[in-house]
Image (cartoon, grey):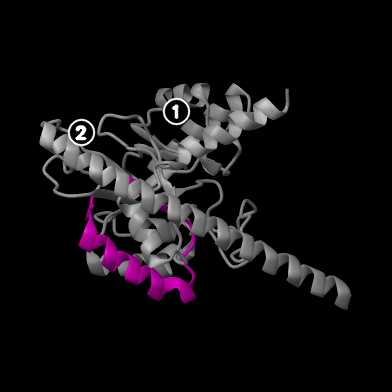
Amino acid sequence: MIVCFVNDAFIKKGGRLQEKIIRLIKLFISVVYFAVDRILNIVFKILGVKKEKSCTVLVYHSIMAEERLSFARQMDALVKIATPIDLSKPGEDVNAQGTLVLVTFDDGFRSFRENALPELTKRKIPVVLFVPSRCLGERPRFITNYSTKGKEIVMSSEELVKLPHELVTIGSHCQKHPHLTILDENSATEELAGSRKDLETMLGRPIAFLAFPYGEYNDQILEWSWQSGYQRVFSTLPDRNKKDDFLWGRIGTSGSDFLMEFQLKVVGAYRWLPWMVMLKQKLKSFLSL
């Protein structure tokens, strides 16, 4: 038993070290991307080329009590370098200046209400909260992060209703947080349309936004989401989101992010990640031939 405990400790330590190395590599690439992007912006300005406004979308899941101070520092940095937008107010971003950013939270955990919401409220930062409508009040089975597993619980319907609707926009995260791409049409559309109906009945207001669980979707899921009445849907890879886009990408963010890492995410310096994912997929396909 002692040997197993030691081995588990070494595995976890090795995993954390590997994760930190990967984060540092991504950070370095993002610094280079940011520098090149800024140079191109100067060139475009000189040439008189007007770039369409875009928006960076951050996605959090948990903010534990021990991360609250770090999250507060991140929000202080956010309001200094960017303009938070309220997605529930169409056209608000038209006259907004500087870097636009949207803050989102997935899963509807109580840690959002207890640790993140007070800091957002202090700074008047709007947020979109995506909730799995048939997991309310439950300990979620879909958590894969070991550090938060067993510590989180999804808010109850009573807690959701009491959230300040002038600051918190509720969106759908399906009913039971499924892997949508492996479901048949009936099951998938029930998850999509059923969740929207659940939340609208509970809250008494329209639900216009959807975040795909695990960020998984395909063309058919996009079509069914549109047919289910959603105005905008969100995945988990960053993109240069434009005003009229139906699908918006997001960059994964946490309270444990380095401050420089967080700031680079806010200004869109991690938008190279989808290209890397595409390259990895092509490389895997090539090697499997």
Asked if the stretch drawn in magenta spans residue 61, the answer is: yes
**Dot 2: what SS?**
loop
- Whether residues under marks 2 and 1 lie with C-beta atoms below 8 angstroms apart, the answer is no
- The image position of residue 280, as x and y in percent, is 59, 36
Residue tagged 2: 52
**Magenta span of residues:** 56-85
Q: Is residue 227 visible?
A: yes
- The image position of residue 101, as x and y in percent, is 28, 50
- The image position of residue 30, as x and y in percent, is 40, 51
**10 Å crowding of disc 2: few (<14), some (14-19), many (20+):** few
Quick one: 120 or 55, which is closer to the camera?
55
Quick one: 109 or 251, which is closer to the camera?
251
**10 Å crowding of disc 1: few (<14), some (14-19), many (20+):** many
Question: Three-letter amino acid code at disc 2?
Answer: Glu
Q: Residue at 74% x, 65% y: name it.
A: 11
Dividing the picture into quarters, in which one does residue 249 lie?
top left
- The image position of residue 13, as x and y in percent, is 68, 69
Image quadrant in which the N terminus is located:
bottom right
Residue tagged 1: 225
Image quadrant in which the C terminus is located:
top right
Dividing the picture into quarters, in which one does residue 157 lie?
bottom left
Q: Nearer the viewer, mark 2 or mark 1?
A: 2
Q: Residue at 77% x, 68% y: name it.
A: 8
Residue 257 falls left or right of residue 284: left
Q: Is residue 104 visible?
A: no
Q: Residue at 23% x, 59% y: name it.
A: 81
Q: Residue at 51% x, 55% y: name it.
A: 25
Question: Three-letter amino acid code at disc 1?
Answer: Ser
Asked if the stretch drawn in magenta spans residue 226, the answer is: no
Residue 70 falls left or right of residue 83: right
